[in-house]
Amino acid sequence: MKTILYTITTFIFLGCVAAGAADITEISFAFIGDADGSAHTGVAQGIHEANLQGQFLGQNYSLEEFSGDDLDAIEPGKFIAIIVATNAGDLSRVGARFKDHPVFNVSVHDDALREACAPNLLHVIPSARMLADAEAQWLQNNPDAEINVSGWHPQFMKFAARDLNKRYKKRTSLAMDQYSWAGWA
């Protein structure tokens, strides 16, 4: 939940800063991961939607893709934040290397990363412990249920989830999953 609040706060701050500007403000994000993966399509959806709103505020959002082996190619001053969808090792390296940037984890469920509590590492995707706890709570009241706990489901309806699922499916022809949701968020 904190990660979502940080994300929302960041976008509100950027919107307020850019609202008074006469020129278009360029806001760039770095994405580290598989450009064909679910997390990337979620990030692309988020950038697309941010640009729909940004055009009224004089903002343009962009995304540049990198692989986990390509960290030297990332120019720190160019990006407002780094979004990582690879593995725990890459995530730790990116967090340590880019200490002055928010680094968003959109794919790694590793509890140890959260326990390390790096100040710039923000976890959007639920941890393994969170997923296990959700499963245990559900099974307490539904002991015979066969479930697959996930951070997102394409049939979610509450809190505008239905509309987000529709927009995502219309744009990508895919069902949103927890990785695309984390990327979007």
Image: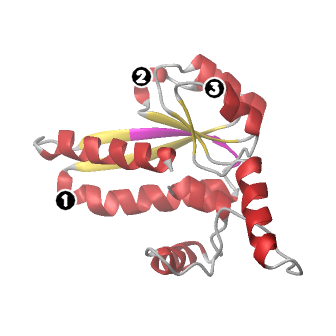
**Residue 69 in the image: x percent, y percent?**
74, 28
Q: Secondary structure at mark 2?
A: helix
Q: Answer left or right for 174 relative to 162.
A: right
Prevailing SS of the magenta stretch: strand
Residue labelled with disc 3: 94
- Which is nearer the N-term, disc 2 or disc 3? 2
Label 2, label 3: how many angstroms apart (C-alpha)? 14 Å
- Check if mark 3's residue and mark 1's residue have beta carbons within 8 Å: no
**Residue 115 in the image: x percent, y percent?**
69, 30
Comparing 29 with 158, the one in front is 158
Q: Which residue type does callout 2 highlight?
A: Gly
Label 2, label 1: how many angstroms apart (C-alpha)? 25 Å
- Which is nearer the N-term, disc 2 or disc 1? 1
Task: Note whether 172 is above or below 64 in the view shown.
Answer: below
Comparing 47 with 131, the one in front is 131
Label 3 Cα crowd, 10 Å radius (few <14 / some 14-19 / many 20+):
many
Residue labelled with disc 1: 56
Label 2 Cα crowd, 10 Å radius (few <14 / some 14-19 / many 20+):
few
Residue at position x 72%, y 62% in the image? 134
Q: Which residue type does callout 1 highlight?
A: Phe
Instruction: Decide whether residue 128 is among the magenta residues.
Output: no
Q: Which residues, given as a range, are shown in magenta?
A: 28-34
As drawn, the label of residue 125 is: none
Label 3, label 1: how many angstroms apart (C-alpha)? 33 Å
Residue labelled with disc 2: 77
Comparing 101 with 126, the one in front is 126
